[in-house]
Amino acid sequence: MKKNTLVFIIVVLISSKSGFSQQTKSILKDTISIDEVVVTGSKTSVNRNNVPLTVSVISKEKIENSSESALLPVLSEQVPGLFVTERGITGFGVSTGAAGQIMLRGIGGSPNTEVLVLVDGNPQFMGVMGHPLPDTYIASDVEKVEVIRGAASTLYGTNAMGGVINIITKEQKEDGFSANGRLMYGSYNTQKYMANGGFKKDGLNVFASFNHDQTNGHRDSSDFKINNGYLKAGYDISKNLRINGDLSLANFDATDPGMEGRHAGNTYDITRGMGAIVIDNKFDKSNGSVRFFYNFGEHKISDGFHSKDKNYGIVLYQAFNLFKGNTITFGVDYKKYGGIAENVKAMNGNGMVFGDTTVFEMAGYAYVQQELFNNLTLNAGFRLEKNSVYGNEPVPAGGLAYRPTPTTTLKASVSKGFRSPTIRELYLWTPANVNLKPERMMDYEIGVLQRFLANKISLELTLFKADGDNLIQTVMTERGPKNENTGSFSNTGVEFAGSYRPDDRLALNATYSYISMKEPIIAYPEQQLNLSGTYKWNRFNFNLSVQHIQNLYTQVTPEKVTESYTLLNSKMSCFINKYIDIFVKAENLTNKKYYINYGYPMPGVIVFGGINLHI
């Protein structure tokens, strides 16, 4: 970190005479309160108590307090059972040597096709390869994130086999204008810049943001840079109807530094975009939404690979409150995805097209919720998915939530998850097989949520078992490698999340997960523990966090390789006044040498400093 940057921060910390910003009052909000209203677990706004699925909610305050630009690493520290691979200072990359693998309860696929990422309820995955692009999810655009830990395909269809990450974006909520900015500098010439702002008046609201990150990286040939812009606008047509539209565009350049001791790999130029138009309705006895979404991208890799892909469709659902305690939701989904993949350097520069095709899926579903005796909620759902390649797939789910006391909730659920074969698996390269069937999983879980001491203590404990079959794997046949539905898994585990708020100055949080896997799965640890504490004193906030990872599988063939490590991180911030706060943060304070991706060493101690501006 530059010396003059540190001097500036220290001088301001010592000399400032101003009081706290109002933002300090919100940083300690409880992010796992069981009274939270969530939408991801049922498609309509319901109390988290009434959702039988296990849902974690990460608030805006928690995300902003991290001072991270990329969203997924923040979630990995806050959600039990969720693990996201990284490979350096910032930037996940794509293709060989990439990180950003998203795993929930040991389920994710490689590349990541078994955990569905949504933005405001709209599915996000690359049309050809079938996986999300982690570098495009920016923390400054986010109001909150809701994570379903477990199968959610009845509501969300393909890729929601292991769970769902729903990124709910910001919008201007108060009349008038607001703006925020961040300047951040740190180790290895890492620079991060952010600006966003919003406006609201007479039913119209607009929010826009821009982010730029760049770094030289902690290894030779590990540089990375990204630009991301986001725009969202909404208008209240009437008291019952609202229309929203959003548009996001990101471009990033990355380099694969290669495995330790080897030459650097490819360079990448990636462009990703998404847009949506949403019409929401809300009446006394009914509410719902119609969503038109479109995702697109272009990938250029220095080895000649080039692709253009798209993923678009419509999401329609309507919930009806037919009588007291009852809600029934009907929905229809349609999506079409695919694109072209080629190598422009093949055939002596004449190029070779590997595939140029699309697949469509259409589904109808119903989801019923019934409350009985004011303390028991029953849920059941059924989905029928039709895929243009393999045909029909039925997807049932059911569960209950029982509240024996106002501070205790017991949950149980059984649900099916599935994942359709991707364009890559069906049509591209030698292993392609057009006769593939979807991957399938049954998820069983029970859990308890408990509060103590006038809600100062919140605890959540979940036990789960996930059995999967029909996994798509490449096997050797007489005619060479071929994709087949031959794999299976059986994962059993426990997850814990807890928080303690003795007063408005101190906040303690903990998450823990343990998993027993019948077969070891790469990029997922047997145990992970996250502990964090935040203390507020006068103008200052102090944060200390510890992450322990036990038996992370970085390689499973030809031999099993595991990694265990403990990381210590800290952050100190000072609120100068309501317009300015500054911070210093350090990661891996003990300078631990560790690996998350096999052969890719992670950085040692890294330090950042920055300033946040608020208008």
Image: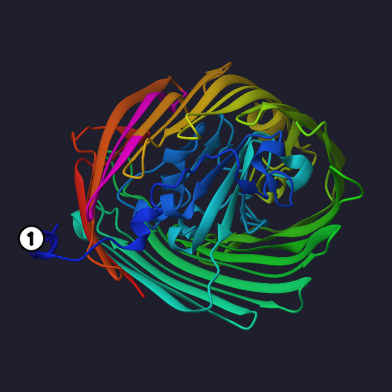
Point 13% across, 59% down: residue: 13
* Secondary structure state at the residue bearing disc 1: helix
Asked if residue 546 lies in the magenta stretch, the reply is: yes
- Farthest residue to the front: give it: 454
Image coordinates for residue 303, horizontal then vertical, percent: 45, 57
Point 67% across, 78% down: residue: 235
Residue kind at label 1, given as amino acid type:
Lys
**Pointer 1 residue:** 3
Point 18% across, 33% down: residue: 590
Dot 1: few (<14), some (14–19), or many (≥20) neighbours within 10 Å?
Answer: few
Q: Is residue 149 left or right of residue 513?
A: right
User: In the rendered structure, which segment of residues is drawn in magenta?
Assistant: 532-557
- In this rendered view, identify the residue nearer to me: 9 or 615: 615
Residue 67 sits in quarter:
bottom left
Point 41% across, 54% down: residue: 26
Whether residue 295 is visible here, answered yes or no, is: yes
Whether residue 219 is visible here, answered yes or no, is: no
Q: Tell me the quadrant of the picture where the C terminus can be found.
A: bottom left
